[in-house]
Amino acid sequence: MNPIIIVLPILSLLMFDLGLTLRGEDFVRLLNRPRSVAVGMLGQLVVLPVVALLLAWALRLEPLYFIGVVLIACCPGGSSSNIFSKLAGGDVALSVTLTAMSSVITLFTIPVLLGLAVQWSGAEVGGDIHLPMGNLIMQNIVLMAVPIVLGVLIRRLWPKVAVRLDGLLSRIAFPALMLLAGIFFVQHYADIVANIRQLGLCVMALILLAILVAAGLARVARLSGAVRRTIVIEVGMQNAAQAIAIASSPFIFANDLIAIPAIIYALLMNVVLLIYVGVLRKMRSSEA
């Protein structure tokens, strides 16, 4: 089975579910809490891609894997971050705002950052990979912007229906992502095992550095504990489904090898954040 058959619908469903949760006040929050939003966006849209570029360069990754690692960092926050923020005792409203804003802003930043990644990787020199900017922008609009807008419209016109749909889709988001990662893992088992040491190190370093940088930025900005936890989760949890969709799409890279770092990331990211949430919950229970 070609994984792209399920990748694209899963990504659209995740974005549609995000739209179902959005309200006007989620964007007004940008004006009311500019410092919290600015720190989250800085960590996610600027610092994380820079960290990914430097890691991929320092570890001398092959061009396809180099692009794949940077692709992860270019993507917006994961749709499950709101659930993780709630479990961690974070600011769920802020989490929704950051996820929504990053999903919109990355429609424009992904092409720029990926173009830079392709140049840095050296892939263009050998002519082995090309980045069709127009196709990338169009796919992001169709698979992300349109489903979000549809979700927002349903939320506005039929709020009760939106709540029921969100309850259903939010329950299947995490299993769907794990199913997607599992299918890719089985199909590309040999390539993953052959490169697991280098890619695993790179991806784990990316996750841990994202968490540390996000926590550091939030502390420097003197944000509250709940807000810090949310920013850590938002910066540490990227939309792996979108990374896989861009890598494997026949309209863009059409190369499953570029998706391998995102597959490894999807598995490690959830393990690390579950540990993070578990430690936080244990600390709160011991203080009670």
Image: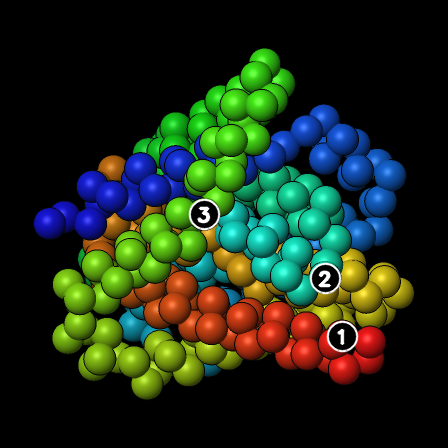
Question: In the displayed structure, would residue 222 be above or below residue 154?
Answer: below
Q: Amino acid at mark 3?
A: Arg
* Residue 135 position (above or below residue 255): above
> Mark 1 and 2 residues: CB-CB less than 8 Å, in contact?
yes
Residue located beneath label 3 in the image? 171
User: At 48% across and 44% down in the image, what residue appears?
Assistant: 170
The three-letter code of the residue at mark 2 reads Gly
Give how far apart the Cα atoms at labels 1 and 2 are: 9 Å
| Residue 22 horizontal/vertical position (percent) | 63, 32
Residue 115: in sight, yes or no? no
Q: Name which residue type carries label 1.
A: Arg
Residue on which the image places disc 1: 284
Q: Position of residue 14 (x, y in %)?
A: 44, 41
Looking at marks 3 and 1 on the same chain, the residue that comes earlier in the sequence is marked by: 3
Quarter of the image for residue 141 reads: top left
Does residue 184 appear in this view?
yes
Q: Residues within 10 Å of mark 3 (few under 14, many from 20)?
A: few
Left or right relative to 282: residue 242: left
Which label's residue is closer to the chain start, 2 or 3? Answer: 2
Residue in front for this viewpoint, 107 or 235:
235
Q: How is the image coloured?
A: rainbow
Q: Which residue is mark 2?
A: 89
Find the residue positioned furthest to the bottom. Answer: 197
Residues tagged 3 and 1 counted as in contact (Cβ below 8 A): no
Q: Which badge, 1 or 2, comes first in the chain's sequence?
A: 2
Q: Give the residue at x 60% y 75%.
A: 278
Query: Which element type, helix, strand or loop, lies under badge 3?
Result: helix
In the image, farthest residue toward the top: 157
Q: Residue at x 78, y 39 (%)?
A: 30
